[in-house]
Every structure is written in C-alpha cells, then in structure tokens.
Image: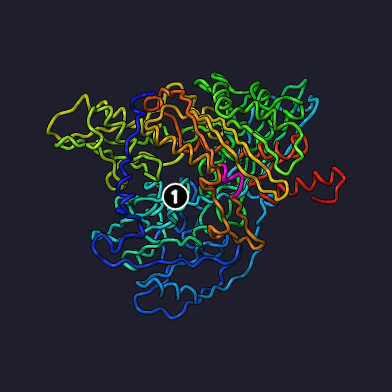
Amino acid sequence: MNTISRSVVKKDHEPKIRGESVFVNDYTAAGDARPILTGKLLHASVARAKVLSVELPELPEGYCYVDARDVPGSNHVLMITWNDLPVFCDETVEYIGEAIGMVVGPDDQEVSRILGEIKVNYEPLDPVLDLREATEAVRERDFGYGDPEKAFAEADSVIEEEFETGYQEHAYLEPQGFMAEPEEDGKMFVHGSCQCAYSVQDAVVSVLGCKYRDVHVLQDVTGGGFGGKEAFPSLLASQVAVAAQKMKAPVRCVYDRKEDLAYSFKRHPSLCRYKMALKDGKVTAVDCDIRLNAGAYCTLSGLVLDRAAATAAGVYSFPNLHVHAAALKTNTVPNDAYRGFGGPQVIFAMERLMDHAAKTLGADEVAFRRQYLVKQGDRTVTEGRHHFPVPLPEMIDMLDAACGYWEKHAAYAKPQNGRFRRGIGMALARHGDGLTGTTERDLGFSIRLRKHPDGRVEVLAANAEIGQGTRTTFPKIVAHELGIPLEKVSYQHPDTGRVENSGPTSASRSLMIVGELLRRAAIRLREQWADGEEQEVRESYTEPDFVISFDLDKFRGDAFPTDSWSACAVEAEVDSFTGNTEILSAVGVFDVGTPVDENIVIGQMEGGFLQGLGYASMEQMAYDGTGRIRNNSFSDYLIPTAADVPKLKTLLHVEEYPDGPYGAKGAGEMPLVGAAAAYAAAVEQALGTDKHRLNRLPITVEDVMKELYREEESDGHDSI
C-alpha cells in the first residue's frame, strides 16, 4: 500500500478527547465579550394554511419578535440556484415546522415562556401528504438510449415491480445550531455547525441584501453532518443573521433534539417502479420511473434527483434504457442531502429487481448479475463512458473469500421450517464521485497554500471537517509533497473571510478533487521554496481531458469523472415466532481508490456500512395524518449500534484514479449505498426464496410477520 496510506493520529483527536473543542453552543460570550441573546423559532403547527395573524404576549424589555417583515433583503434562502424556501413564512405555511418567526432575548427560559404564549391564527388549506398523490414536480428528468419501446414490445416476458423507501434521519451527535454577531464595521460574522461555509455566505448575503465583503462565515467545530449540515444551516444562519441585525447584538439559535428530529431535513422517501424486458433468457431493456418526495420546498432536491437518475441502472449495462425521474412537492418536512445523495434509493430498486429477475429465470443471482456488469469503456446511463477499470468481479471474489458466500447461499436456499431461519444476500453498488456534470469546471473552485517565514504551511480551503478526517488528510498530502513534518502543516476550520472557495463538503469530492489541488500546489511550493520568506501558491480546478462534457439539459455525457464501487454481503437470522431479525455478519468490499489514511478510510467504511444497515432494518420514521413527524426522540427513532452488527468487516480493493491524489477517489458515501439491498436479500432468503418480495425499506418486524402470516395461510393454516 502507498506510504501515504499509513495512519496517523487525527489532528482534531486530542482536543475532542479532552473536551477542549468549542462547538457553537459552547460560547459563553461573543468574540468581543458581548452577551449572547437566545433565539427560538415559532414553528407552524399545521401542514398547509394561510397565516391570518400572530398574537404576541407583552414582550419584556430586551426581548423582541422577528419575522418576514424584518428581512432586509430576499426572504428566500438561496441554495445553489433554488430559492423557494422562506427565511420566515410570508402568507402561508407549507409544512409542520416551518418557521413563522423567532423570539429573541437574554434569558432562555423567558424566551421559551413567550414562545409558548404566542397564538397563531390559521386558515387551513388542503395539504398533499402522500407521495403517490403528488403531482407538482420541482425537478424532472426524462432520458435514455436505444429503443426500449421496441424491446418491451418484442419481449418474451416483462418483470415489473414497485420499490419504496422511507425517511432516514441524519442523527448527528450535535443538533443544528448557528450564531450571528454584528461587527463594529457594519459587517456580519456568522458561525456555527455546517458543511459548506460559502453556501451559508451566499444565503446570508442574499437575505441581508448586502455585499459579499460584508458577511463572513466560520465553520465551528461540527458534531457530524452526513449531509444534514449541507443545506439546513443556510436557513438557520439566515434567521439568526436577520435577528442579530434587528437587535444589533449577537444572537444564537440551537435546536434541541426533539426540534431537530421533527423539523430538520431528511433523506428523500422514494417510490420507484422498474420494468425489465426479457427475451431468450436475456435482459433486453429496463425502464426506470423514479419518484422522490421533495417535501414542501426544493432545497437541494434537484441535485439529489439528478444523481438518482444518473445512477438508475446501478452497476449494469443494458441494451436499451429509459429513465424518468421526478422530485415531487408534498406538504411535509423538506428533504435534502444525505450520505449517498439519491443513490441508496435507486440501487435498492435495481439490485432487488436483479435478484427477482434471476429467480424468475431460475438463475443464480450473482451469476446473472455478472452478465450485465459494466466494464471499462462501456457507456454510462447518461451516455458518457466508464473511463477506468471496473473491479467488481475481483471484489465479488474477495467477498466470497471473506464470508463464504457461495457455500452459505446454497445451504440457506434449502427449505427451512424451524423457528430460526437464515439467509445471506449480496448487493453491488456504484457511486459517482464529485459534483454532477460540469459544476466543478464551471464554478472554478480553488485553494491556496501559505508558507510562513518560519517554515510553517497553512492550507487555505473551505472544506469542512465533519468527522471524515479532512483536517488530517489535507495536511498529510501537503507535508508528504513538501517533505516536512506533519505538525508543520495546519488546516483550521474555514472562515470565508480568509480562505479560498474550494467548493462544498459533499458529493465525495473533498479528498479526490480538493486533495489533488493541494498536492499540485504543494509540488509548486516545493519548487519555489525560499527559506525565511512568506509565500503563497494558488491552484484552481481544471477538468481532465478525458471527460465527455456533460449537457445538463439533455442530461448526456460524463455525469461524474469516475466511480467508487462496492460489493457487500449480509447474513441474517429471522425468528419466525417474533419476527425479529438479527444480523449475524456483514462484510463489505470497497474500492475508493488509494486511502490517504487507512484508519480514517476504514472508519468511514464501517460507519457508512452500519448506517446503511440501519436504513434497511430499523430506522423507521413516519408522519401522521396531519403531516407531523411522529419520531422526535431517540427512544422512538432507533439507530444501530455496534451491538446490532457484532461481526462487521470491511475490506479495501484499490483501483487507482489517476486524477485523484495518489490514486484516491471519493470515500464518504460509498459504504452506505448498497447495504440495504444486501440486507433485504438476506431476509428474503431466510423467509423463503420463492415466496417473498421484500421491496420496502425499512423492513420492520411487522413486515416480516406479514410475510410469515401469508406463508402460513398458503400452507393451509389459519395463523402463525
């Protein structure tokens, strides 16, 4: 393995272990020692309604109420190119939890008291809560290749199935929190828990109606994100900035856990209808209809939909393909970025369809898959190219060697009639690395390295440390190229007032894209090095020559420069008396290119894999008949712990990407994407290979009991 892969102690390890890291809720005063005012939001209690009036109690001195009338600029939060999400509602609310206003004051308990005494008068409007009834698309794609209509018309048979996935809550350790401090020169300093400081700056500048130089944003130490700190902080930062400007004082708003679980953005629920044409035992066409629940506002749903659409066929190549994808508006909590970004929903559908097609044909599921695996040089879903080797065949063999897949699969395929029944399932997945299409090229992201006279080097980039190791891996790359000790290279939490815009911390792009810019900059600095002098080197992104330029309107070309790949297997045991399912073992083989720090990458693989298993098996979140999220604590929204998967193993297969640092590719999202499909396949085999179709996530105890009940009925018994 490359020497860069040797693990080091993470740079933020010691301060976090010692409790010295300062999160946004840890500040006892503003930077200039002024006291911090508390802001708490007045959330809508109905899914859709006109707000007729807001009746406030008498406000004590030093307290105020902030709403849309106080917004000096746009009352809509800019998120990339979308700005439909209000800072504070204007005339109508569109989901339970939407911010109507904010109460601000010096005492937390008094703010809560005032908030509890506010009365909102509504004129109810009819909400759309069910994705199946939604008709308004916030983004839609329709594309394909070949002649799928002809292939379906000539097919011997057609397999058509529906797949459904639910919410997934990010469940980061630190809830949403942001703080705004008006500065003496009239500028606004905004800081808090976030992934994308420059995106927050874009939003706050638009909302305050000021110039970019008048706002700077700092990412505080952030207790996890998984995508949940990508778009939502732009909303919360805008709200506290408006409040701080009105009060001319620092204002902080930190969600409590109940508030965070109920009102923060989630993973998009999905409804996918896939059709497969079979002719002479071969797949001749696939038709994919993908529907994502965007919730009440678009936020980043358009981007999530694009990635889902570009991943619609999974790891396979078919002669004819049609994809229709739509993100649809409902009057429920908005949905947004989450690890995998649309990939887990469609990979689940595609992998389940491949399993069921193989069973229909009487073929082995993995042997059937091998016939259609993409290879280097094959076209992608968007008629780009897979420019680099696809190592899935080797990864399948690694998986079998690690868990005895073939032997167990054959054994569990035999009839099982006892109380405990076992199954094993496999899933294959891909994740396109980097931002979709030409975004990297068009926005011109860049970084700087600053060498101080004493030989210390500082990384000036905007990518956030959210647990994935950026504050360690970026300095490792620079130190490696400069040949200096790691402790002489620093990377602080980014402040937009002093660092380059190197792009968002998302899309598995930070190490692959920004890390490579740092490597190139470090080489240039090494060549120019002058002892005792201050020097700076800047490096900007340029698109690799091999990339087939992406046409966003036609949705054609290279959606991503390269892919990460995974093969994972899950072994499960079902208790047919109780419906409980236990994961006996889970093994994942991941190709994320060269690990720049092996321990960090293995940690990411283990954490993401476990998160995917939770998505499949227990993370059930739902809204009631009024549109209210029912799960608002970790007592009724369960996430997996190490005890839930006692035997979890991750392995790395390295297929180097020449335009990533030392061959590195995107790592953060890949381990989650395929886990759910492997789990579903395992449970389905345990229940009986030919009798069951588990096409909905999460697979609950109730789902298992329903399948067992149907089995008993088909055997002539009244019940289990």
Q: Quadrant of residue 9?
A: top left
SS state under label 1:
loop
In this rendering, the answer to whether 154 lies above or below 625 is: above
Of 500 and 359, the residue lying toward us:
359
At which x and y percent is residue 125? Answer: 64, 65
Magenta span includes 44: no
Residue 304 location in percent, x, y?
Answer: 54, 42
Which residue is labeled 1 in the image? 229
Q: Observer-nearest residue: 582 or 554? A: 582
Q: What residue lies at 37% left-to-right and 44% top-to-bottom?
A: 464
Of residues 10 and 384, which is closer to you in this image? 10
Q: Neighbour class for label 1 at 10 Å: few (<14), some, many (≥20)?
A: many
What amino acid type is highlighted by mark number 1? Lys
- Give the overall secondary structure of the magenta segment: helix
Instruction: Classify residue 672 as left or right of residue 143.
Output: left
Quadrant position of residue 711: top right
Residue furthest front in the image: 418
Looking at the image, which residue sits at the far right?
Answer: 716
Q: Image quadrant for the N terminus?
A: top left
Where residue 479 sits: x, y (%)? 26, 31
Image coords of residue 50 (percent x, y): 58, 67
Q: Is residue 617 magenta?
A: yes
The single residue placed furthest to the top in the displayed view is 377
What stretch of residues is rendered in magenta? 613-618
Residue 304 is at least partly visible in this image: no
